[in-house]
Image (spheres, coloured by chain):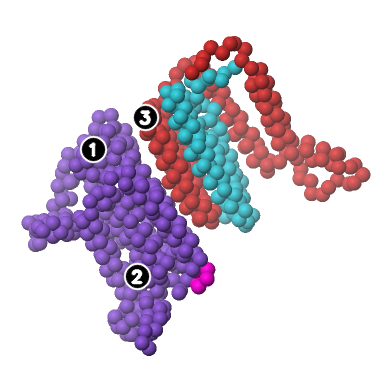
Amino acid sequence: MLAELWSNPAVQTLTWALVKVLIILHAMLGVVSYLIFAERKICGHIQARVGPNRVGPFGLLQPIADVLKLLFKEEFIPAGANKVVFHIAPILAVFPAIVTFSVIPMGPPPMFVVTDINVGLLLFLAMSSLGVYGITLGGWASNNKYALLGGLRSSAQMISYELAMGLSTIPVLLASSTMSLVGIVQAQAGAYKVGTIAGFDLFLPNWGIFHWYLVLPFVIFLITAFAETNRAPFDLPEAEGELVAGFHTEYSSMKWALFFLGEYMNMLVISAIAITLFLGGYHGPGLGIGGGGFWDPGPAWMGLVWFMVKLGAFMFFFIWVRWTYPRLRYDQLMNFGWKVLLPAAIVNVLLAGVWIFLKGPRA
Amino acid sequence: MIPLFLGFAAMLVITSLMVVLHKNPVTSALFLVLSFSSLAGIYLLLHAEFLGMVQIVVYAGAIMVLFLFVIMYLNLQHDVETGVQIAVRRGIGWLAGAVLLLAGATLLRRGWALGPANEMLPDEASGNVAAIGKVLYSRYLFPFEITSILLLVAMIGVIIIAKGRARSAGETT
Amino acid sequence: MIPLNWLIALSAIVFCIGVVGVLVRRNALVIFMSVELMLNAANLAFVSFASHMKSLDGQVFVFFVMTVAAAEVAIGLAIIVHLFRLRETVFVDEIHLLKG
């Protein structure tokens, strides 16, 4: 009976997709908890001190201690809070980020991507639009002035920067002529000739940022990524010391942990998307492994390795920026989003469109 | 495919009902977000992927956020709905909805037309007016009657608005 | 292939629920939400016809309907906010200055 169920190709695809989803979910949850630990270590070193190093060798068991502490904390719901919304707000904060992972290619398809829908980029934009709800509803449902202020500030910030983010991905679309993320990565394969210096041909990988018209969109995307994930220097909604604790003032124990997890998951997902759109996704030199030249793409799992390396670099960049720059004030933030980033993104769409029309996407 | 569609359809109908029935406007708005998402799911099943995603981006992600902003800004509490007048109006509202649904069900059963389909035009001898009359009163009877109700409503509205104020204008604010 | 009758019946049901919402509720915001429900029911009808007649005209029209609905919601909510500032209420039966 199992054999004839397995012979149905739909059942096969579904089972493989479920297996991949489970793997990604567990892996990402593990990565996120150690990401929090990495942040504290790096923050410590930036501030000329050592981060947590008591629990376990080099403090490596710190996340486990944190999780145990959070599990045992008392969980209370403020009086007058809307109970249903209070409970589902943290879930809403985490869910869009996890859903986006299903369309990101972490290695050469078809094995390393859960599903390849032909509007993958639009799914990412849709999920980032849904990400506004968790924080707004969390702030509102707490029946607390500071939480409400933090929630409303955060949603205003997120919807303002969402526009610039969407517009900054349009040159990528123009260059690769497809909205499917797998297609976008595959359009960044290989290398293209940039010029000749002293008789030597100069090649650059075909990644997004090595085309001049995608450099500014990359910068805009990075800045809006910081704003979308409420990370410094755009973290006024959760500003410690300014708004008590912002939108998660009234949340304790696992619900707060879910918000925190959601923020780091969002960070991971936006970095993954930035890598997919601008940094060539899973492409990288095969380093001669598995036969073939140094620059030829190696076996399929090398793609996964390169993706993880780039993701790690991005995470380090996120953490680095957080502990280096001061916070933006709210009006400076909104000013920047609407008056600087949005016109820049629009102008870039124009320039990229004209260039691609005249010269084609690989020039 | 069909069970998936039935699931989305059930969720759409149930969440729409909850939008209309629930007293707290914030909960209504959240149920509306859910119904938009199930509608996006139906669009995906109908091979309209772009529209499904745009539905989530525009409706669930932007329009409903606007709604929630306004509801939070106005600090609306539960709707208080008591009083005989309100109950009467509510009864009439449900009755109107039931009548509309019944009309829709009748049309559905009859294949969306009353009367047989006219495959070819009637012979030239009877003329255009007779031909249109034949079609209008058999196949397209329902839209014809609905149009007459529409005109009646417009007439009543015009009469009321044009009548002017019967009492003197006392309230000025 | 999902039968066209079912899709149109679903669209009709959601439309009727929207109509009931507009007639029954007093809160202007909920009435507005019911209007959005009606618009979406019409969108569903468009998309189901587009999928059954294998033509994309229905989907293009839905695109424009969504744009117009977004603009309409923005302006309508601005009007409601302004009305709230003047009248301190969002209940439509308490705003009867123009009543004859």
**Place of residue A172 in the rendered image (x, y in percent of width and height, measured from the top left):** 44, 64
**Place of residue C79 in the rendered image (x, y in percent of width and height, measured from the top left):** 49, 32
User: Which residue position is annotated with label 1?
Assistant: A250
Q: Residues within 10 Å of mark 2 (few under 14, many from 20)?
A: many
Q: Colour of chain C?
A: cyan
**Place of residue B16 in the rendered image (x, y in percent of width and height, measured from the top left):** 48, 37
The residue tagged with tag 1: helix, strand or loop? Answer: loop
Classify B36 as above or below A304. Answer: above
User: Which residue position is annotated with label 2?
Assistant: A282
The residue tagged with tag 2: helix, strand or loop? Answer: loop
Q: Colour of chain B?
A: red
Q: Are dots 1 and 3 on a single chain?
A: no
Say whether residue A232 is visible: yes
Q: Residues within 10 Å of mark 3 (few under 14, many from 20)?
A: few
Q: How many marks?
A: 3
Residue stretch rendered in magenta on the structure:
A356-360
Q: Residues within 10 Å of mark 1 (few under 14, many from 20)?
A: many
Identify by letter the chain in purple.
Answer: A
Does the magenta run of residues contain A297? no
Which residue is located at x 45 percent, y 49 percent?
B57
Which residue is located at x 39 percent, y 26 percent?
B78
Residue type, mark 2 in image: Tyr
What chain does badge 3 belong to?
B
What chain does badge 2 belong to?
A
